[in-house]
Each structure stands twice: as structure tokens, then as C-alpha cells.
Image (cartoon, rainbow, N blue to C red):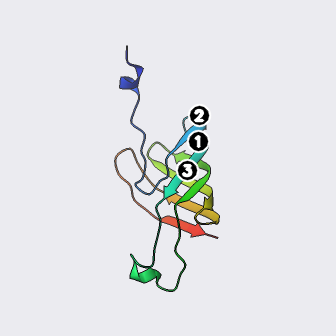
Amino acid sequence: MDASANTPVSFSAPDESPGFALYDNGFFKAGLTGRLRTPRSSAEYTELRGIRDIDWTVEAGGFAEFWTFNKLRARLELRRAFLGMNGDVADFISIGSNSTGLGPSRSVRA
């Protein structure tokens, strides 16, 4: 018997990092997340002229996601970048539903 057939599909935004929840009570989730960034070179992107090239970068950290009502949510991701790039990354993704995404998505790099 497949229990996943009765489980609703979880919403995720295209700019959301993959991860898995360590805690989930239905309206609040928290867990681990990560992202792998490809190299960026000024030879490939003219916008990067004068900036040093960046090798493969791994970003690892955590997320917290809060569902208000039954259809709206806010998600915060905090990640530490290492290897190619060093620094902290914070992504805020807000307002989503089970089938659509709308609203601001902000990324801050320090």
C-alpha cells in the first residue's frame, strides 16, 4: 500500500534551496538546506568584468517555514557559503500556495 498517494504535494518555489525538514507540525517546518553554485567567470559574463572568478561553491545551512492560514507561507533560509565563495547568504521567500507562487523573494549576501 502506497501511503504517499494520500499525502498532499508540498509547494516549493523555483528559487528555493533543496532541503529536508527535521521538525514539521503542519504549520511550521524547520530543517537543513543546501545549494551548489556553478562557477562564475568574467570570461563568460561581461557583467562580471573586474570581479574575481568564483569556483564551484557549496552553501549549507537551515530553513524555517511558516504557513499562515492554509495557503500562504513565508520561508527564511540562512546558509554559509564555502569553497569557491565565502560568506553568509539569507533568502526570504514569501506568499505561496499549493499551486502558485507570488510575492517578494529576496537574497542577501554578506
Helix, strand or loop status at disc 2: loop
Upstream in the sequence, badge 1 or badge 3? 1
- Figure quadrant of the C terminus: bottom right
**Residue plotted at (52% across, 53% down):** 35
Q: Position of residue 67 (x, y in %)?
A: 52, 45
Residue 64's label in the rendered image is none
Residue 25's label in the rendered image is 2
**Residue plotted at (61% across, 60% down):** 83
Mark 3 packing: few (<14 Cα in 10 Å), some, or many (20+)?
many
Q: Quadrant of residue 98?
A: top left
Q: Quadrant of residue 4?
A: top left
Q: Kindly check if marks 2 and 1 are in contact, taking CB atoms under 8 A apart as contact.
A: yes
Q: Nearer the viewer, residue 12 or 41?
A: 41
Residue 28's label in the rendered image is 1
Helix, strand or loop status at disc 1: strand
Q: Amino acid at mark 2?
A: Asn
- Figure quadrant of the N terminus: top left
Q: Amino acid at mark 1?
A: Phe
Above or below, 47 relative to 37:
below
**In the image, which is nearer the foreground, mark 2 or mark 3?**
3
- Where does label 3 land, which residue? 34
Q: Measure the C-alpha gap from mark 1 to mark 3.
A: 19 Å
Q: Position of residue 80 (x, y in %)?
A: 64, 58
Upstream in the sequence, badge 2 or badge 3? 2
Q: Kindly check if marks 1 and 3 are in contact, taking CB atoms under 8 A apart as contact.
A: no
Q: Amino acid at mark 3?
A: Gly
**Residue plotted at (63% across, 60% down):** 82
Q: Measure the C-alpha gap from mark 2 to mark 1.
A: 6 Å
Give the residue furthest to the top: 1
Above or below, 84 relative to 51:
above
**In the image, which is nearer the foreground, mark 1 or mark 3?**
3
